[in-house]
Amino acid sequence: MAESGSNDGLDITCPCCSTKLTVDRDTGDILYEQRPEKSEVSWDYALTAGDKRKAEAEALFSKGMDRERRADDILEKKFKEALKKADKSDTPPPRIFDLD
């Protein structure tokens, strides 16, 4: 957002970080910069948040590993069923040359 300031500078607010800048109209140099106050985060809060993220990541990893183990079993069962059906069938599979 641009706002007209004094004759020397142009006051601009950054849409990303909300920093207020005063920029020289002629040269484009930054004359003044005012950054917003950062909220203080306690060390204990950061530590517990890190532990929580680690636990969530481990849970997601173990869930994915279980899914992969079951996927192999399911594929093996499907393959065995396909073999059983192929053994019961007397007709050979169609040849691509006969389709013309």
Image (tube, rainbow, N blue to C red):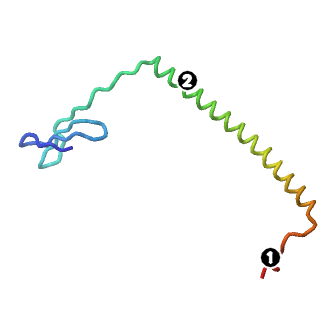
Q: Above or below — where is 23 with respect to 44?
A: below
Nearer to us in this view, 21 or 74: 74
Query: Where is residue 10 shown, x and y percent of the image?
Result: 13, 43
Q: Residue at x 80, y 44 (%)?
A: 73
Query: Where is residue 35 shown, x and y percent of the image?
Result: 25, 32
Side of 64 where 92 appears, left or right: right
Q: CA distance from mark 1 to mark 2?
A: 59 Å
**Label 2: which residue?**
51
Q: Residue at x 32, y 26 (%)?
A: 38
Q: Residue at x 11, y 49 (%)?
A: 26
Image quadrant where one finds the C terminus: bottom right
Q: Indicate which disc, 1 or 2, sits on the residue closer to the N terminus.
A: 2
**Label 1: which residue?**
96
Identify which amino acid the numbered label 2 is placed on: Asp
Q: Above or below — where is 67 with respect to 84?
A: above
Query: Where is residue 64 shown, x and y percent of the image?
Result: 67, 38
Label 1 residue SS = helix
Nearer to us in this view, 70 or 39: 70
Image quadrant where one finds the N terminus: top left
